[in-house]
Amino acid sequence: MPLRRNRRQYEQLTDFDRGRIIGLREAGWSNKRIGRHLGRSDMVVARCWQQWITEGRVYRRRGSGRPRNTNDREDRAIRRVATSAPTTSLASIQRHLPPSRHPVPSRETIRRRLTEVGLRSRRPLNAYH
């Protein structure tokens, strides 16, 4: 019967765990001891440490992904319009954006940009039911 391992060791490391691994290795801990301490495989610890030694970083590279439709200036304009008038609709935010070389961002794009900074749509409370 095959040995079942702890499922957590197959999950990706968080940036916090990567930093802990580097700190503990620099403090003189062995890969095996760190692996037991964090509930990870000693090979996971060894790969993280090797990446730190060879590349000088432990975080993952950002994926290429699809290019953003809006730039930083437009993102700031979206936030500014939304925070200055919280009851503004997405369509009116779309009309208030500065002219740019891009096509006008869709309402879904505007909603995504607002969600990224923690803003979301609010429905007014109906006091008279």
Image (spheres, rainbow, N blue to C red):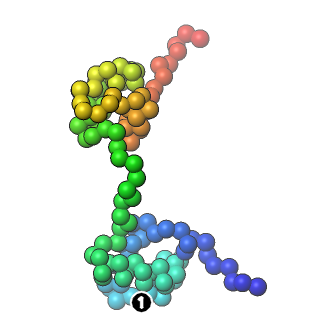
Q: Residue furthest right?
A: 1
Q: Residue 66 in the image: x percent, y percent?
A: 39, 48
Residue in the image at 59% along x and 11% along y: 129
Q: Is residue 26 found left or right of 125 in the rendered image?
A: left
Q: Is residue 4 found left or right of 13 in the rendered image?
A: right
Q: Residue 29 in the image: x percent, y percent?
A: 39, 88
Q: Residue 27 in the image: x percent, y percent?
A: 32, 85
Quadrant housing the N terminus: bottom right
- Residue situated in front as seen by the camera: 16 or 4: 4
Residue 5 visible within the image: yes
- Residue situated in front as seen by the camera: 16 or 79: 79
Residue in the image at 61% along x and 75% along y: 6
Are there few (<14), some (14-19), or many (20+) residues within 10 Å of tag 1? Answer: some
Residue in the image at 50% along x and 19% along y: 125
- Residue situated in front as seen by the camera: 24 or 46: 46
Residue underneath mark 1: 30
Q: Is residue 105 above or below residue 19?
A: above
Q: Look at label 1 and name its amino acid.
A: Ser
Q: Quadrant of residue 87?
A: top left
Q: Is residue 118 above or below residue 107?
A: below
Residue 37 visible within the image: no
Q: Residue 4 in the image: x percent, y percent?
A: 68, 79
Label 1: element kind = loop
